[in-house]
Amino acid sequence: MVFSGIYAAMITPYEDESGYVSKKRIHKLCDFLIKSGVHGLFILGTTGEGLLLSKEERMQAAGHIIKAVDGRIPVIVHTGALSTKDTIDLTLHAGSIQADGAGIITPAFYRVSEGAILKHYTSIAREVKDFPLFVYNLPAFTNNTVSPELLLDIAKKSKNIVGIKYSSNNFQLFEDYRKMMGKDFHIFMGDDSLILKSLLMGGDGCVSGNASIYPELITKIYNLFQQEKLGQALYKQLELDSFMKIHGKGAILDHFKTILRLRGIDVGRVRSPLQQTSSEEELEIQKKITAMQIKIIEEKNVTC
């Protein structure tokens, strides 16, 4: 499979009362994202609160999403966990439910050597030989990073590791990845402020948290780039930069869920210990969205 385009880093919907994963709300959100033109979903990652869910909940949520999407677009499941064993279990499950691939965060919290990172990924890849895997490099959150040389070594030793999601504003490293890896290796940007720049430098697309709440804008950037309308694409990137100021570039994840709720799709609130949006903050966000003239979605137009 060729992976390219705008992949929404999907928010995980919960029920209001119990806080459990909501099957009904998952279906509604998936329909909205697909109708809005995203090219794929990256689920249960940072934006999806994956590490706040138990292993069983992650498997359950992944199953619900795969059924809701029903093959309409590709789904990459984030299966990274603190231990290699749990990561293998989650990755095997993603393959068993017919996901299109898995994204795997680097070892996190503990600082480890490049040799340990290499062993981590190759051990997982051996267990799912025919299943496409993406390295997920988020150094600011994990305390570990993947150098271009290490990425090449990982890919050489594990043929089913087909790409990387890189989430950082160190654009030099992105460029080094592109130079180091062959043209068939998929490189996705995870910093939404760098979407257009990454496409210009040979990126295959982006995994975007903002594509979960304002997908029509993010897909315009990509589609205009594909049409070689670079001036218009730049204008949309600048519009996205302004939009991101509304929610502080995702610093408070519940702002994402608040914006979706204001747009007509209730996905519940974030899990503790993440900070929830206050009523005053929600009012301020609503004012800013109105000022940007972002269309509010009518419930009748987003059906399950």
Image (cartoon, rainbow, N blue to C red):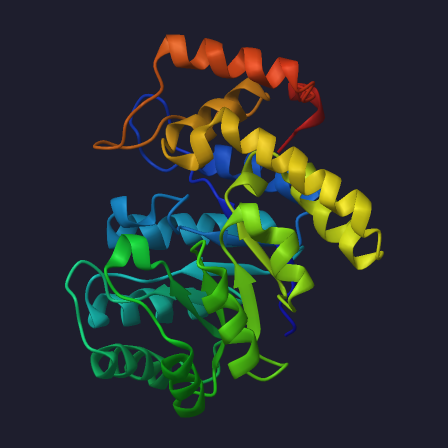
Q: How many marks are shown on the rendered structure?
A: 0
Residue 83 visible somewhere in the drawing: yes
Q: Is residue 7 left or right of residue 17?
A: right
Residue at point 55%, 25% (across, down): 265
Q: Quadrant of the C terminus?
A: top right
Does 19 sit above or below residue 169? above
Q: Can residue 53 be spotted in the picture?
A: no
Q: Is residue 42 depicted above or below 257 in this figure?
A: below
| Side of 196 where 163 appears, left or right | left
Q: Nearer the viewer, residue 292 or 212?
A: 292
Residue drawn at the location 28% of the way across and 49% of the way down: 51
Q: Is residue 174 above or below residue 265?
A: below
Q: Position of residue 124 (x, y in %)?
A: 32, 78
Q: Determine the residue located farthest toward the bottom in the rendered image.
A: 157
| Residue at the far front in the pictured view | 172
Q: Nearer the viewer, residue 195 or 17?
A: 195
Residue occupying the point 47% across, 77% down: 131
Left or right: 292 in relation to 86: right
Quarter of the image with the N terminus in it: bottom right
Q: Position of residue 243 (x, y in %)?
A: 58, 30
Q: Position of residue 136 (x, y in %)?
A: 40, 64
| Position in image of residue 67 (x %, y %) | 54, 51
